[in-house]
């Protein structure tokens, strides 16, 4: 009798099918995990941006003398702040929602700080309003 020296075609096809199935399942799980990871990252980024904006707005409202809306999506808050020598002075801070409703601009002492929600919201518009 001759000894068997190789694998039959059926055996090779069976192993190939098992390997392809395992690789397809691994790829599916990998893609689902990466998609979930991106979603969680976007959500975390949104919450981080919004909490920073709310904290800044809360501080300005607590020290405010007046709040006025000059044009739609633009608010001016007149506040009392202190300088380096702890002397009070009036300061006007402007909060403005961009026309595409994806960014909030905060202008303080001529410097503009931008809260860009475009990546965190996947292009969805945000709602931002200050009620005096």
Image: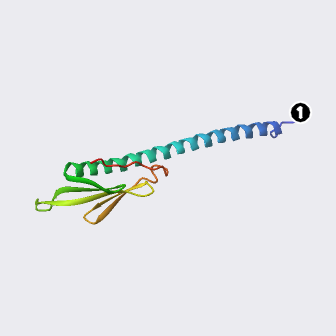
The residue closer to the viewer here, 106 or 31, is: 106
By what rule are the colours in the image chosen? rainbow
Q: Residue 28, located in which quarter of the rendered image?
A: top right
Q: Is residue 13 left or right of residue 114?
A: right
Specify few, some or many for label 1: CA neighbours under 10 Å numbering under 14, 14-19, or 20 or more: few
Residue 62 placed where, x, y %? 20, 48
Q: Residue 9, located in which quarter of the rendered image?
A: top right
Residue designated by label 1: 1
Q: Residue at horizontal 14%, vertical 62%? A: 84
The residue closer to the viewer here, 50 or 16, is: 50
Residue 40 placed where, x, y %? 46, 43
Q: Residue at horizontal 42%, vertical 53%? A: 117
Residue situated furthest bottom in the rendering: 110
Q: Is residue 23 left or right of residue 59?
A: right
Residue 115 placed where, x, y %? 37, 55
- Give SS at disc 1: loop
Q: Is residue 64 left or right of residue 18?
A: left
Q: Vertical placement of 9 versus 95: above or below?
A: above
């Amino acid at each position: 009798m001759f000894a068997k020296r190789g694998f039959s075609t059926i055996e090779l096809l069976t192993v190939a099918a098992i390997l392809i199935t395992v690789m397809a399942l691994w790829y599916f799980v990998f893609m689902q995990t990466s998609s979930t990871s991106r979603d969680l990252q976007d959500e975390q980024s949104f919450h981080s941006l919004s909490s920073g904006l709310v904290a800044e707005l809360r501080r300005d409202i607590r020290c405010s003398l007046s709040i006025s809306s000059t044009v739609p999506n633009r608010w001016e808050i007149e506040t009392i702040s202190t300088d380096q020598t702890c002397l009070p002075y009036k300061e006007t801070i402007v909060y403005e929602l961009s026309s595409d409703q994806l960014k909030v601009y905060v202008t303080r002492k001529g410097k503009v700080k931008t809260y860009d929600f475009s990546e965190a919201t996947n292009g969805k518009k945000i709602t931002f309003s200050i009620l005096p």
